[in-house]
Image (cartoon, helix red, strand yellow):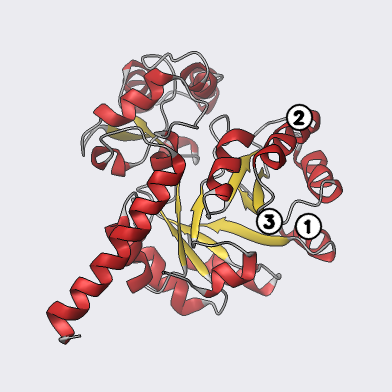
Amino acid sequence: MIKTELCDLLGIEYPIFQGGMAWAGTGKLAGAVSEAGGLGIIGAGNMPPDALREEIKKVREITDKPFGVNIMLLSPFAQQVKDVVIEEKVPVVTTGAGNPGPFMRELKRYGIKVIPVVASVALAKRLEREGADALVAEGLESGGHIGTITTMALIPQIVDAVSIPVVAAGGIADGRGMVAALALGAKGIQMGTRFVASSEAEVHERYKNAIVKATDRSTVETGRSTGHPVRVIKNKLAREFIKLEAQGASPEELEKLGTGALRRAVVEGDVDMGSVMAGQISGLIKDIKPVRTIIEDIVKEAEELILSLSKKYLGG
């Protein structure tokens, strides 16, 4: 069985994280991932504190295994979300969209493991110095908010730069991706898009089907001009966004176009004028499966691939 120090650090069976996706990372999905042996993560996004408490309750109704909450640091509720995490004794926090330094020391005082999402070596080194327990290094192949460096290039550079465990994210959806991440020095993987296309994901079926129908070139990057690029499946909204960017639209105009777009896609199933966040790996996802099957299939494939490579190239 594939086991790394990340498993011991967090008390999980498999070194597999579910991405902390706003709207999609609900208590039901997080609970299913944790119960299946990975680390399920509630995507707090702009969730008010009372709503987060309800999602935490849902996780604990499903499993007694470790889980996490992703704090989106730009959220107007970030401070209150942090307080809820402490009060509810959530064991793991991942962070994104900002510097978690001011929160990290307080969270760690309560024994909470803090694992920021990073997209550069400089930020990785800085957050290690500030006390991060591990890091999620996310390449631009990911769905949703992205950086500027590919996973293949980013992971080994961050692994070489820090001494804490690194979780690889971006462009991973099967056992081959897991083995590649481990070969690059990562101690685990994080998947978002693959778990969106699962039975337990509480996203609209049209959203799931858009992922299943996607090909290798179905996603596009929007919003680079605003400083907050996002990867989505190309649809009417994305085309309009790209058109306005090319015409030099102001950040205010672009923000207005994107306001509420993720909810429209996830909740209402509007895959034309909603923001269908998905990674470049979408073209590999051809079906909707239960979370447990996804995890077990990935681990089995990874184990078989490692054995096969050993026999083929090392005579093992």
Specify whether residue 172 is in view: no
Q: Amino acid at mark 1?
A: Pro
Q: Secondary structure at mark 2?
A: loop
Q: Position of residue 178 (x, y in %)?
A: 35, 61
Foreground of the two, 54 or 221 = 54
In terms of sequence position, does the residue under pointer 1 or pointer 2 come before the other? 2
Foreground of the two, 115 or 179 = 179
Q: Which mark is residue 22?
A: none
In terms of sequence position, does the residue under pointer 2 or pointer 3 come before the other? 2
Q: Indicate the quadrant where residue 112 lies.
A: bottom right
Question: Would you say 282 lies left or right of 50 here?
Answer: left
Foreground of the two, 66 or 19 = 66
Give the residue drawn at x 38%, y 46%. Answer: 294
**Crowd tier of the residue under label 3, counting other residues whose Cα lies within 10 Å: few below 14, some 14–19, many 20 or above:** many
Q: Position of residue 95 (x, y in %)?
A: 63, 51
The quadrant of the picture occupied by the N terminus is bottom left
The quadrant of the picture occupied by the C terminus is bottom left
Q: CA distance from mark 1 to mark 3?
A: 16 Å
| Tag 3 residue | 92
Q: Amino acid at mark 3?
A: Val
**Crowd tier of the residue under label 1, counting other residues whose Cα lies within 10 Å: few below 14, some 14–19, many 20 or above:** few
Q: Which mark is residue 48?
A: 2
Q: CA distance from mark 2 to mark 3?
A: 19 Å
Give the residue drawn at x 72%, y 56%. Answer: 91
